[in-house]
């Protein structure tokens, strides 16, 4: 079985080499940097916490589609994303982004073997992978993590970099420009690397391990956000 797993992993590495699509992603990143500079006042703190190289699992809150821009603006890598990338509050032009970037798409409630194996292959090559533990975009308080991020962290044992991103005016990008006659203010805080998280059986982490790891991941993200967003994950509550 181990030999078969090694063959599968080698096949996935050939299919998903790290880094990939450097030219396309470089052009997209440059465009994103220009547009976000024009439309927003984006402050990023904690860049000194970013490791010089991978492997690295980047996690963050998911209040708006602009959360997805934070890792691109904050780092220099042609990073990989994994997620369903439903973007209900994104302008239509932004909805082509996942296809252009070639994000690893998953569908909640399905095994998603291709995306999970691709993610593991990327991390095995010292790649950098971004995943939003809550899954879907939502407003309000942080929500409990779905199993994906915790499972990936336990299975691969790679370091984890948390990010927290908030905005004034409820992330209303164009409404801020038209009504308030100013750029939207966005703030991203990058936390310290933590982990690796360990499992008694990394090939198949238990439900209890996944739940515990998911709560820890959300607590690390919560610590980078104002208290009104943290909900049950506030690290300051004993």
Image (tube, rainbow, N blue to C red):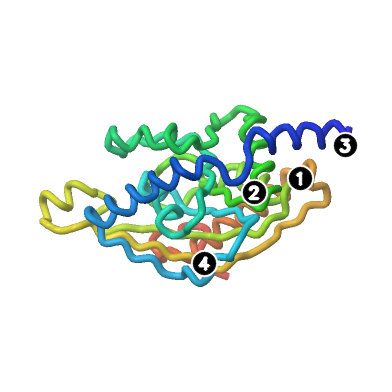
Pick the quarter of the image with the C terminus: bottom right
Query: Residue 34 in the image: x percent, y percent?
Result: 29, 53
- Residue occupying image coordinates x 73% and y 32%: 11
Q: Label 3 crowding class (10 Å Cα cut-off): few <14, some 14-19, many 20+?
A: few
- Going from N to C along the chain, the mark reached first, 4 or 3, is 3
Tag 3 and tag 1, C-beta contact below 8 Å: no
The kind of secondary structure element at disc 4 is: loop
Viewer-nearest residue: 109 or 40:
40
Q: Which residue is mark 1?
A: 205
The kind of secondary structure element at disc 3 is: helix
Query: Residue 112 in the image: x percent, y percent?
Result: 62, 30
Horizontal side of 153 relative to 217 (left or right) equals right
- Residue occupying image coordinates x 32% and y 37%: 94
- Going from N to C along the chain, the mark reached first, 4 or 2, is 2
Q: Which residue is mark 4?
A: 191
Residue 150: mark in rendering: 2
| Residue mark closest to the camera, 3 vs 1 | 3
- Going from N to C along the chain, the mark reached first, 1 or 2, is 2
The outermost residue toward the front is 23
Q: Label 1 crowding class (10 Å Cα cut-off): few <14, some 14-19, many 20+?
A: some
Tag 1 and tag 2, C-beta contact below 8 Å: yes
- Going from N to C along the chain, the mark reached first, 3 or 1, is 3
* Mark 1 and mark 4: Cα distance apart in space: 26 Å
Q: Which residue is mark 3?
A: 2
Quick check: can you spot residue 147? no
């Amino acid at each position: 079985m181990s030999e078969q797993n090694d063959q599968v992993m080698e096949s996935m590495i050939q299919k998903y080499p790290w880094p990939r699509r450097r030219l396309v992603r470089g052009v997209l990143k440059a465009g994103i940097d220009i547009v976000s500079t024009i439309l927003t006042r984006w402050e990023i703190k904690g860049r000194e916490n970013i490791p010089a190289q991978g492997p690295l699992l980047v996690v963050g809150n998911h209040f708006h589609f602009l959360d997805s821009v934070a890792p691109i603006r904050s780092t220099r890598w042609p990073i990989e994303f994994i997620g369903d990338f439903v973007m209900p509050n994104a302008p239509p032009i932004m909805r082509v982004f996942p296809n252009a970037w070639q994000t690893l798409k998953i569908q909640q409630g399905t095994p998603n073997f291709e995306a999970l194996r691709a993610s593991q292959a990327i991390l095995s090559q010292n790649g950098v992978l971004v995943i939003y533990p809550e899954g879907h975009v939502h407003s309000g308080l942080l929500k409990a993590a779905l199993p994906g991020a915790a499972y990936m962290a336990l299975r691969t044992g790679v370091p984890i970099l948390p990010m927290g991103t908030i905005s004034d005016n409820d992330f209303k990008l164009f409404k801020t420009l038209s009504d308030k006659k100013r750029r939207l203010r966005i703030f991203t805080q990058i936390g310290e690397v933590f982990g690796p998280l360990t499992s008694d059986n990394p090939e198949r982490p238990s439900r209890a391990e996944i739940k515990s790891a998911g709560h820890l991941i959300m607590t690390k993200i919560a610590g980078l956000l104002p208290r009104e967003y943290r909900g049950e994950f506030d690290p300051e509550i004993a």
